Image (cartoon, rainbow, N blue to C red):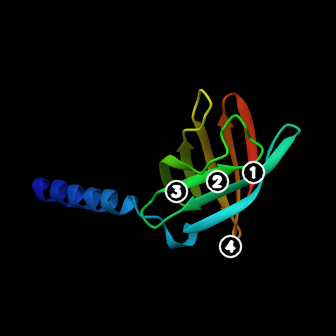
């Protein structure tokens, strides 16, 4: 009996891991909006694809770079998404966004000692 419960838990855990990499449909696409750090601001584009991967791009954030950068980690947790990207700076861009309403994100991140906020 104990072995059956253990196997059931293992199968459930494996099924969760297999599907954890997929992006929930409501997040798929490109989200854009303003980012702010102190008196500096610009535009941010955050993209999530069906495979649980994505990319990020900024205007006016020279420390990060101007090109599209792939996200190195993405985790979907209910209405929150945690993500990481490797920019041109010494440290990773580590951020999170919350889905507010049907179609808007509010988020923040830390990058190279900067506290960045954004609305997409």
Which residue is identified by label 1?
118
Res. 120 visible in picture: no
Q: Mark on residue 102?
A: 4
Q: Secondary structure at mark 2?
A: strand
The percent position of residue 73, horizontal first and vertical second, equals 47, 46
Label 1 near label 3: C-beta < 8 Å? no
Q: Label 4: state its secondary structure.
A: loop
Q: Nearer the viewer, residue 83 or 57?
A: 57
Point out the tag, 2 or 1, that comes first from the N-terminus.
2
Q: Nearer the viewer, mark 4 or mark 3?
A: 3
Residue placed most toward the observer, 111 or 66: 66
The quarter of the image holding the N terminus is bottom left
Q: Are marks 1 and 4 in contact (CB under 8 Å)?
A: no
- Residue at which label 2 appears: 97
Considering the numbered disc 3 on the image, is that residue within a helix, a strand or a loop?
A: strand
Give the labeled residue for mark 3: 54
Q: Which dot, 1 or 4, sits closer to the camera?
A: 1
Location of the C terminus (image quadrant): bottom right
Looking at the image, residue 19 sits to the left or right of residue 52; the answer is left
Around disc 1, counting alpha carbons within 10 Å, would you say few (fewer than 14), some (14 to 19), or many (20 or more)?
many
Residue drawn at x 61%, y 39% as measured from the top left: 93
Q: Are marks 2 and 1 in contact (CB under 8 Å)?
A: yes
Measure the alpha-carbon separation of dots 2 and 4: 14 Å
* SS for dot 1: strand
Q: Give the residue furthest to the right.
A: 39
Q: Mark 4 and mark 2 in contact (Cβ < 8 Å)?
A: no
How far is mark 1 from mark 4, CA to CA?
A: 17 Å
């Amino acid at each position: 009996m104990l072995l059956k419960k253990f196997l059931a838990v293992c199968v459930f855990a494996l099924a969760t891991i297999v599907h954890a990499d997929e992006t929930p449909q409501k997040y798929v696409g490109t989200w854009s909006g303003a980012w702010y750090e102190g008196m500096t601001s610009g535009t941010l584009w955050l993209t999530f694809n069906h495979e649980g991967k994505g990319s990020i791009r900024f205007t006016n954030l020279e420390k990060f770079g101007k090109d599209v950068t792939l996200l190195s980690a993405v985790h979907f947790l209910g209405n929150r998404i945690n993500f990481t990207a490797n920019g041109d700076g010494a440290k990773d861009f580590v951020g999170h966004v919350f889905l507010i309403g049907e179609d808007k994100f509010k988020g923040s991140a830390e990058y190279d000692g900067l506290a960045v906020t954004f609305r997409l």
